[in-house]
Amino acid sequence: MAARRRRSTGAGALAAVVLGVAFALADGGIGAAVPERALERSAPVRLTIEAIGVDAPLMELGLKPDGTLEDPPLEEGNLAGWYSLGASPGERGPAVITGHLDTRTGPSVFARLAELRPGDTVRVLRADGSRPVFVVERVEQVAKEDFPTERVYGPLDRPELRLITCGGTFDPATGHYSDNTVVYARLAAPDS
């Protein structure tokens, strides 16, 4: 495989516009009651998706100086990142986890993300020892210029999970993919 320049998941650039507003709302600005199943905040440390062979540690991600979402290191193929300024998995709101599709030398942690189907399960190990289980509701591939910022980052009164990676075709001139793959999952069990 030819060497590729560093590329981002692409979600950050478009999502940064509403991140501040969305997370301010998700942190209590909407006035909705917290569902009984919601967990307290705890950092996720590991992600397991049996259907596509993912068993990966998680690192915390923030925002770059330009306001876009940070990416996990490109060369660490089995590492995903959790957007730590948003909800933690199991907490009320959309918890966002990103990972690369590939590296310069081969597949990365989310190489098979687009293969997930409704009903597949996603398990998260959190620092407090809890293991919430999420069930995939839908998977979509969207052009990066049409990234569904509100659907991904918008406020929710229930715990949900978003998994994001690149998709579509790779443009060697820009070093980026044309699309994003986004997985939407809901909390099925607060602790397994």
Image: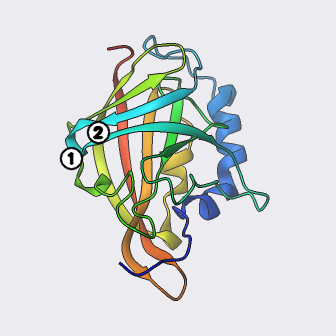
| Left or right, 116 with reference to 39 | left
Residue hosting label 2: 136
Residue 118 appears in the figure: no
- Which mark is first along the chain, 2 or 1? 1
Q: Residue at x 52, y 79 (%)?
A: 175
Where the C terminus falls, by quadrant? top left
Residue 117's disc is 1
Farthest-out residue, right: 65
Q: Residue 8's quadrant in the figure?
A: bottom right
Q: Dots 1 and 2: beta carbons under 8 Å?
A: yes
The answer for how far apart the CA atoms under marks 1 and 2 are is 7 Å
Three-letter code for the amino acid on which mark 1 is drawn: Arg
Which kind of residue does numbered mark 2 sit on? Val
SS category of the residue bearing label 1: loop
Near mark 2 (Cα within 10 A), the count class, few <14, some 14-19 or many ≥20, is many
Q: Quadrant of residue 22?
A: top right
